[in-house]
Image (tube, rainbow, N blue to C red):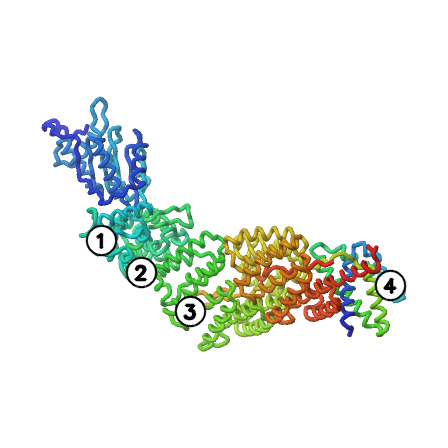
Amino acid sequence: MADGGQVAYYAAPRPAVAWPHQVGVLPRQADCFQDRAAVVQLEEAVARGGTAVLCQVLAGMGGVGKTQLAAHHARQVWAKGGVDLLVWISATTREAVSSAYARAAAEVLGTDLTDAEHAASAFLAWLEPKAGTTQRRWLIVLDDVADPADLRSLWPPASSQGQTLVTTRRRDATLAGSGRRLVPVGLFTPDEAAAYLATAMAIHGRLEYPDQLTALATDLGHLPLALSQAVAYLIDADLDCAAYRALLADRARTLNDVLPDPSGLPDDQSTSVAAAWSLSIDRADQLPPVGLARPMLQLTAVLAPNGIPTPVLVSPTALTYLAEHRTDTDGQACAEEVTAQDASRVLRTLHRLSLIDHAPGNVHQAVRIHQIVQRATRDALTTEQHDQLARAAADAVTDAWPEVERDTALVQALRANADALTRCAEDALHGAPGAHPVLFLVGRSLGESGQLSAAVDHFQRVASTAHAHLGLDHPDTYTARKELAHWRGEAGDLVGAIAALEELLDQMLLTSSPDDPDILAVRQDLVGRRGDAGDAAGAVTAFEELCEQTLRVLGPDHLHTRVARHNLAASRGEAGDVAGAVAAFEELLPDQERVLGPNHPETLRARAHLAHWRDEAGDVAGAVAAFEELLPDQERVLGPNHPETLMTRASIGRSRGNAGDTDGAAEEFEKLLDQMLPLLGPDHPEVLSARHNLVHWRGQAGDAAGAVTAFEELLGHMSRVLGPDHPSVLTARHNLAGSRGEAGDVAGAVAAFEELLPDRERVLGPNHPLTLLSRQQLATWRVTAGTAGSLAAFEELLNQMQQVLGLEHPFVITAKRNLVGWQGEAGNTHDHPSTD
Amino acid sequence: MLDQALTALAASGGTAVVTAAGTDAWVGLRQAVARWFGRSDVQREQAELERLDQTGAAMRAAAPAEAERARIRLEASWQARIEAVLESLSESERDQAADQLRGLLAQHAPQGPVTAGQGGLAVGGNIDIRADGGSIAAGVIHGGAHTGPPPLPDPSQG
C-alpha cells in the first residue's frame, strides 16, 4: 500500500461510500446513438480479453465517435450492475489524469486532496488486486488520451476485477503493449451513416429521400462527427438535403460556413468539425521531424483521399514544399533542408495521430486521408496559399510520373491523384502561368492505356478551360486542341480529327510563321491523318516537303526532323513502295539509336516498323525473327499491356499465319483479344483489328463458311464504329468477298468484289496497292468462275501491277504464282494428266 | 517492248522455275527450260543447265529465314532472263518460242492449288509530335503501323 497517505487513511474515519459509485461525468449519449459494427467489436474485444486483456484501447481519427462508443459501453456495464466503481476521466493531459485519480481517491478512500500526487498513488494502489480481501469491481475510462507518455506510471493495474478503456487518436506501438488490446474505430459504414441520418432527420420531423441521405453521407465521408453537425446545421437553417449538399459542394465556402458554430454544436460536442483536428496537427508539428506535419498534411489535402503513392510525397518538389513551409517549435518559419527520410517519418507521425492512414508497404496507395480532414486543412489556407499548394502538389505528381508507363497500377493512382487535384484546384492548374503539365500527362496516359473516349473528354475539358483562362491563342490552348484532335483520330473519328487540325492550323498561321516548330508539329499530325483516311500518295508528297522543311529549319538531329523521316518512311510503305519503306527505316534506325539510345520507346517503335515493312516486302521469316527479338525488349521497357507490345504480338500472329501456320495465328489472336478486350473495350480500332485477324485466320484454317458469317457480323460493327468509307471497313468487305468464294459461292465473290472496286478506287485511288489487290482478287475469282477472257484480263492486270508496284511486291508475287498455278493446272487437265 | 501476254508469260516462267526447284517437277522442267534457252546451241544449253543447278542449290542452301527473299530475287532474275530472250528474237521466232515456253510450263510446272503469300496491310504509323505545357517536348509515334488492319486473304484456287 502507498505509504504517504497511510496516516491520513487510518486517522480519518472511513467515508461511507455507497456502492456502486461513479467518479467523473460521462458525456451525454448522442441524440441518435447509432448502433454500429464497432459496438460489437468492442464487446467482443472485452469478452475475448477474459482475464488476460483487461485494457482496451479505442483508436481512431477525430470525429469517428470513440468517446460515444466508450460512453455507450460504460452505460451498459453500469446498467447491468457489472461494476462497483465507474471512473470517467478526460485524459487530455497528464495533470488531468492525475487529478482525476486524486479525486477518485478522495471520494472512494477519503484521501486528503491537498497532496494530489499521493492521493493518485493511493488510488492506483487501491486498484491493485490483493489476495484475501474482497475486491471492488471497477471500470476506468481514460477518454481522449493525447499522448501515451502522459500515462507513464498512471496506467491502472491489471486486475481480474477491473477493466480499463482508453480512447485516443494515437496509434503508437506503445499503446498496444502487453495486457492491452488495440481496437481500431473507423468511420460509419455507408449503411450505418444512412441509418444515422434517417433517424436524426426523423426525430426533427424531417423526411428525406434515401438517395439524398446516402449522397450526403458520402459527401461527408461517413464521418460521424460531421454527420451529426451537418444535421444540426441543416435543421437549424431549415435546408433540405439537396440544398445543403449544394452549399457543401461550393468550393468558395469553408466547412465553418456549412457547419454549426460552437454555440450550436449537437450532443454537447466541444469542437466543430473544422477544429476537430487542429490539436492533433499542432501536436504532430511538435514531434520530430519538427514542423513538417502541417505542410505534409497540406500536400495530402489536395491529392486523392483514397490513396496517394509514396513517390509523390517524397518527390523533390514535395520535399521543397515541406522545407519552404517548415516551422520551428515556436511556429516560426525555418527553411531547413528536408530529406526523403524526413518525409517518411512525418508520414508516420501523421499516422500515429490518426490524421492519415499510412501503409508504406502499399506503395501505390500508401497514404489515405479522410476527405473532411482534407477540406478542413484546405480551408485554413488563403486563396494564394491554396493555389501555391495545388501547383506544388501538381509538380509532385508530375515528378512521380514514370517516363514509360509500364506500372499500370502506379499510373492509375497518379491519374486519380491528378483528378482529385483538378477537382479542388481547377483554376490554379489552368490559370497563369499556363496549363499545368500534369493535365497533359493525364490525358495522354488515358489515351495510351486505351481509354480513348476518356482521353477525348479530358482534352475537351482542358482545351475549353485553357481557352477561358489563358485565351484562344495561348500555346497551351493550342496544345490541348492538338491533343484533342489527336485522340479523336485515335478513337476513329478521322474526319473530325482532320477538320479540327485544319482549323487549328489556320488559326495558328494567323500569328506564327510557317517555319514555327509548333506549326510543323500540327502539320505532321494533319498529313498523317489524311494518310490514314486514305490519301496515301498525298501523304508521301506532304511528308517529303515536311522532311525538307524540318531539316532546313531545325537541323538533322532535331526531334521533328526524325519524326518527319519516320512518317515519310511509313507513308511510302502505305503508298505501296514497300522496299522504299524498308530502306528508309533501315537508314533511320541507327540515327534513332544514336540520338535516343537503344531502349527509348521511339527506337523500339522504329524497330517495330522496320520489321513490319520487311514482312510486307515478303521477308516473313526475317520479320518474325525481328518481332520476336523486339517483344521482350518492349515487355521490359513498355510493359506487357502497352498497346505497342500488344501490337507486336499481333504482328507475330500475322506473320505466323503468312508463313502457313494458320492455327497458330488464330490461337495467338484469340489470346490477344482476351487480353485487349477488358483493357480497350469492344469499339477500339485495335480490338476490331484483332477480331478481324481472328476471323480471317480461322477462315484460313479451314472454316470458310464460319468466316462468312463472322465477317458479316464484324463488318456491321466496324461500319458503325468507323464509318462506311474507313479503309479498314473496305478491307473487311474485301475479306468477306474472298471468304464467300472460299466457301464455294464463286458468283457471290465476283459480285462482291465488283461492288467493292468503285469504293476502293474512290477512297484510295486506282493505283493504291489495296485497290490493285482487290482488282487482282476480282480477276482471280472470274478465272475460277470460267468467265470468258478472264485469263487475258488477269495477265493484263499482272503487267499493270508490276509497273506500279515493282517485281518484288508481295501482291505481284501472289499474282504470278496464281498464274503459274493455272498454267500447271491447264497442263494437268488438258495435255499431261499423269505428269507429277 | 513485249506485249502484256508475253510479259505475263515471262513472269509466270520465272516463278515456275524457282517454284519447281526441289520438287518432283524439277528434273523435267530443268531439262526443258535449258533446252528452251539453248535454242539448239548445245553449249548455251549446258550453260543454262549450270545456271539452273545454281538456282536449285541456292534454294536448298537458303536458311529458312532467307528462303522467301532468295526465292523472290531468283524469280525476278529468271523472269528478266526470259524477257531478254523473247525481246532478242524476231517477231515470228518470238511467237514460236512463246508457244514452246507455254507448252513446257503446262507440262512441267508444279501443279496443285495456288499457294500464294497472303496480302498484308499496313495502316497508321504517323508520328504525332507532342507538346508539354506549351513547349514541344517529345515526339511520339502513334498507331501501330506494324500491325494495322488484318491481312487480306488470298483465295487458294486450284
Tag 3: residue type? Answer: Thr
Of callouts 3 and 2, the N-terminal one: 2
Residue bearing the label numbered 1: A235
Give the distance between the C-alpha atoms of the residues marked 4 and 2, in whole angstroms: 92 Å
In the shown orientation, is residue A657 left or right of residue A130?
Answer: right
Q: Which of the two discs, 3 and 1, sits closer to the camera?
A: 1
Drawn side of residue B58 relative to residue A97, left or right: right
Q: Secondary structure at mark 1?
A: helix
> Residue at left 36%, top 52%?
A305
Residue at mark 4: B35
Number of other residues with Cα within 10 Å of mark 2, as a class: few under 14, some 14 to 19, many 20 or more: some
Say which residue label 3 marks. A477
Q: Quadrant of the N terminus of chain A?
A: top left
Q: Residue furthest top?
A: A132
Where does the image place residue A171, in percent across and percent down from the top left? 31, 42
For the image shown, how many numbered marks are present on the structure?
A: 4
Q: Secondary structure at mark 3?
A: helix
Which residue is tagged 2?
A: A386
Image x and y of residue A649, in percent:
58, 54
Q: Residues within 10 Å of mark 1 (few under 14, many from 20)?
A: some
Find the distance from the CA under tag 1 to the CA under tag 2. Answer: 31 Å
| Marks 3 and 1, how far apart at CA | 46 Å
Asked whether residue A608 appears in the rendered view, the answer is no
Instruction: Let me know if marks 4 and 2 both belong to one chain.
Output: no
